[in-house]
Image: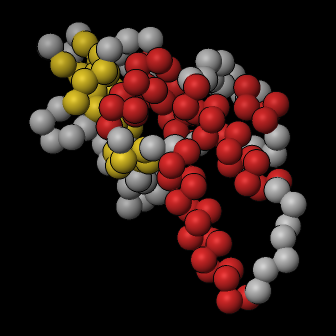
Amino acid sequence: PFNCPSAMLSGGPFAIKRLSFTAIRCRLQAFASETAAPQQVNTHYRRQRARQHDRSYKSACPFTVHRTASDNLPVYVIKRKNRNEDVTVIKKIRGDPEAFRKEIEFLCQTRASYGKSGFLQIVGNHRRVIKGYLQSI
């Protein structure tokens, strides 16, 4: 989604101004792999290179959030405590849950915890910020 590293902090009115170290590292490594000089390889090894690229991206970004069947991000806001408290819930998290929890805590500047079913919950309505971040990675 980004053409250069300087585009990381630009965006619309809901752009994320603060990015954690892991997010910046993920984007820079993706940018470096896109802009690398093309090498002469045999057609036999193209699939092997594609697999290696996928593995390097997984090591760069230790978590993913899968989309729903309707191709939306699984970020929901629910009401608790007699509709006085908002709780943002993120589902379909794959990969390293602690790295994702730290990213979200840094992004929202609040505590995040995991529920019994494996979803992440954050007190407060942080839907726009989290969706903007997940769309950018």
Judge from the rendering whether residue 30 lies leftward or rightward of residue 69; answer left or right.
right
Q: Is residue 117 above or below residue 124?
A: below
| Residue 73 seen from this side | no
| Quadrant of res 5 | top right
- Residue drawn 58% across and 33% down? 23
Q: Is residue 52 above or below residue 36?
A: below
| Quarter of the rendering occupied by the C terminus | top right
In the rendered image, the residue lying farthest to the bottom is 44
- Residue drawn 84% across and 70% down? 39
Front-most of residues 89 and 23: 23
| Residue 40 seen from this side | yes
Q: Is residue 69 above or below residue 115?
A: below
- Residue drawn 38% across and 12% down? 110
Residue 128 x, y percent position in the rendering = 51, 27
Front-most of residues 58 and 85: 58
| Quadrant of res 25 | top right
Judge from the rendering whether residue 90 lies leftward or rightward of residue 14; answer left or right.
left
- Residue drawn 67% across and 82% down? 45
Judge from the rendering whether residue 16 lies leftward or rightward of residue 76; answer left or right.
right
| Quadrant of res 41 | bottom right
Judge from the rendering whether residue 68 lies leftward or rightward of residue 58; answer left or right.
left
